[in-house]
Image (cartoon, grey):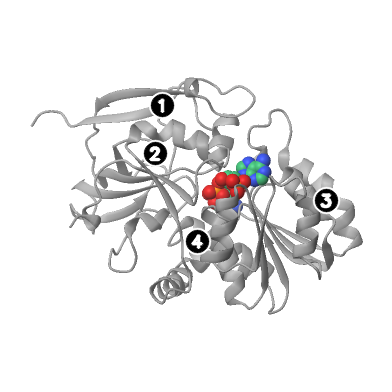
Amino acid sequence: MADRMNPHWVLARMPPEGWPVDADFAWREAPAPSPGPGQMLTRTIYLSLDPYQWGRRRRGVEAPGEVCHGRTVSQVVESRLQGFVPGDFLFNTNGWQTYGLTGEGISTFGYMFPRKLDPSLAPISSAVGVMGMLGLTAYAGLYVQCAPRAGETVVISAASGGVGQVAGQLAKLRGCRVVGIAGRAEKCAYVKEALGFDECVSHLDPGFADRLRTACPEGVDVYFENVGGRVFETVLGLFNSGARITLCGLASQYGAMGEDIVQSWKAAGDKTFSERNMKVYPLFVGDYVASHQDQFLAEMAGWLQDGRIRYREDIHEGLETAPRAFQSMLSGGTFGKTLVQVSPDPTRQA
Ligand code: NDP
């Protein structure tokens, strides 16, 4: 059989200060690898684009010339791993490439792989979104760490994004007053009208601080932090005594160089945290996979099926779109959970 070609993106250079540009990525083509004992070859269907990928590249975790890292939804093409057969759908880490190996000796980057997907439970694309990593992130941060009570005010930043849209709806299920923060007007409208948040305020609005204060007349009890920077500084003045924060991510800061962005964030908040007797919970979703993923997936499948949780995906067609879609996602250009469709999804074909 002729070689199966594997188009992919590599990191072209050590990224300089700031945000990604086209020159940070290089397109390559090579024959697809063959699976060894205990491995399988999988075809990428969906590639997840996530803000942390840029932080990772900026910190040098990924070296120039390496395939860009990314979580994926894939289908098994050849298997030498017991329990997996061609045709199975998986959540795995193929990265920004068309084919990848999964199984023994292949890094899982701190996650548990491979996870087989059941297309009858939810669309397979959601395994990198609401029915997977991002949903579990929202669930762990909100329910396990902050445990909001009915009537409390919960504020969610990047509210229309992959994590934010789920976190806010989970808070609504607990009977909280939920206030989102997002960018463009259409994102704010979606968060309020389609997702059912009580309010959504745009951080692009010149009157952002006043509008946020008005949206939280009884102060803020729980804050789900996704972006940091000016948004965080604005929320800071509104915390009630005993408020809790999930420090999930700092998407506005991932282009920074030469500073510890978490330390800077803590330094900005420290005085308020101690004066108001607050708790800050750093979050790494990988810490909750073994303990909470099964329960989370069962609950989320039910919420999706009965329509209590809704979600929006922004799917870009073709692996070649990945660098531009990634740049757009980091600057608020995409809308919903950002994905690239790398190859056809057989579960969505008529
Ligand atoms: P999103 O889909 O929410 O994309 C990021 C969004 O951040 C942008 O679309 C934009 O939305 C917003 N943003 C970017 N820059 C700014 C800015 N300067 N000010 C305000 N908002 C800004 O990403 P995800 O849902 O995938 O991730 C959300 C956060 O969760 C990230 O910080 C990520 O790193 C973190 N995360 C953490 C995990 C963990 O284990 N702790 C696991 C997974 C994700 P808008 O247009 O509305 O401004």
Q: Amino acid at mark 1?
A: Val
The residue type indicated by label 3 comes to: Gly
Q: Is residue 163 left or right of residue 106?
A: right
Return the x and y of residue 28 as percentages of the image width and height: 33, 23
What is the total number of numbered labels drawn onto the structure image?
A: 4
Question: Considering the numbered disc 2 on the image, is that residue within a helix, a strand or a loop?
Answer: loop
Q: Return the disc, 3 or 2, that comes first in the chain's sequence.
A: 2
Q: Helix or strand or loop: what does disc 1 sit on?
A: strand
Quarter of the image where one finds residue 58? top right
Query: Which is more toward the observer, 199 or 269?
Result: 199
Q: Disc 1 vs disc 2: Cβ atoms closer than 8 Å? A: no
Instruction: Determine which residue is flagged by label 1.
Output: 10
Question: How far is the residue under mark 4 from the one under mark 1?
Answer: 28 Å
With respect to residue 278, does 301 lie above or below?
Answer: below
Q: Amino acid at mark 4?
A: Gly
Image depth: mark 4 or mark 1 in front:
4
Q: Is residue 287 visible?
A: no
Cα separation between marks 3 and 2: 35 Å
Q: CA distance from mark 1 to mark 2?
A: 10 Å
Do we see residue 322 in this rendering?
A: yes
CB within 8 Å, label 3 to label 2: no
Give me the C-alpha separation between circle 3 and circle 4: 27 Å
Asked if labels 1 and 4 touch by Cβ distance under 8 angstroms, the answer is no
Q: To which residue does mark 3 refer?
A: 269
First in sequence: mark 1 or mark 2?
A: 1
Q: For mark 4, what is the residue?
A: 135
The part of the image, by quadrant, that contains residue 192 is bottom right
**Rendering coords of residue 294 (x, y %):** 44, 69
Name the residue beneath numbered marker 2.
95
Secondary structure of residue under mark 3: helix
